[in-house]
Amino acid sequence: MGQIDRFDLNKTIIEYGATVFLETGTGLGSSLGFALNFGFEKLFSIELVEALYLKAKEKI
């Protein structure tokens, strides 16, 4: 995971009108799990490594 938890996603949603969360590199799903708490209308996460995708799918 990067350091998404250091950002105020509510501010981003309000300031830029963001309604969609998109990330590349799902990893274990930590960033996606964090973003789920902010009311995005749609969330997309792209993972190329199948083993990581499966672990993230279990977690989320």
Image (spheres, helix red, strand yellow):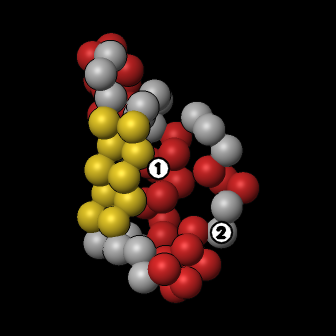
Q: Residue at 42% x, 82% y: name it.
A: 17
Mark identifier at residue 23: none
**Is residue 42 depicted above or below 23 in this figure?**
below
Specify which label sits upstream in the sequence, 2 or 1.
2
* Residue that extends furthest to the right in the rendered view of this protein: 6
Quarter of the view holding residue 2: top right
Q: Residues within 10 Å of mark 2 (few under 14, many from 20)?
A: few
Q: Residues within 10 Å of mark 1 (few under 14, many from 20)?
A: few
- Which amino acid, by three-letter code, is at mark 2? Asp
Q: Quadrant of the N terminus?
A: top right
Per the image, the residue denoted by label 2 is: 8
Q: Residue at 38% x, 20% y: name it.
A: 52
Q: Residue at 31% x, 57% y: name it.
A: 43
Where is residue 32 shown, x and y percent of the image?
44, 48
Per the image, the residue denoted by label 1 is: 33
Q: Residue at 61% x, 78% y: name it.
A: 11
Q: Tell which of 16 and 29 is nearer to you.
A: 16
Q: Tell which of 35 and 19 is nearer to you.
A: 19
Give the total number of marks visible in the rendering.
2
Foreground mark, 2 or 1? 2
- Which amino acid, by three-letter code, is at mark 1? Gly
Quarter of the view holding residue 12: bottom right
1 relative to 52 in the view: left or right: right
Where is residue 40 shown, x and y percent of the image?
37, 70
Q: Secondary structure at mark 2?
A: loop
* In contact (CB < 8 Å): disc 2 and disc 1: no
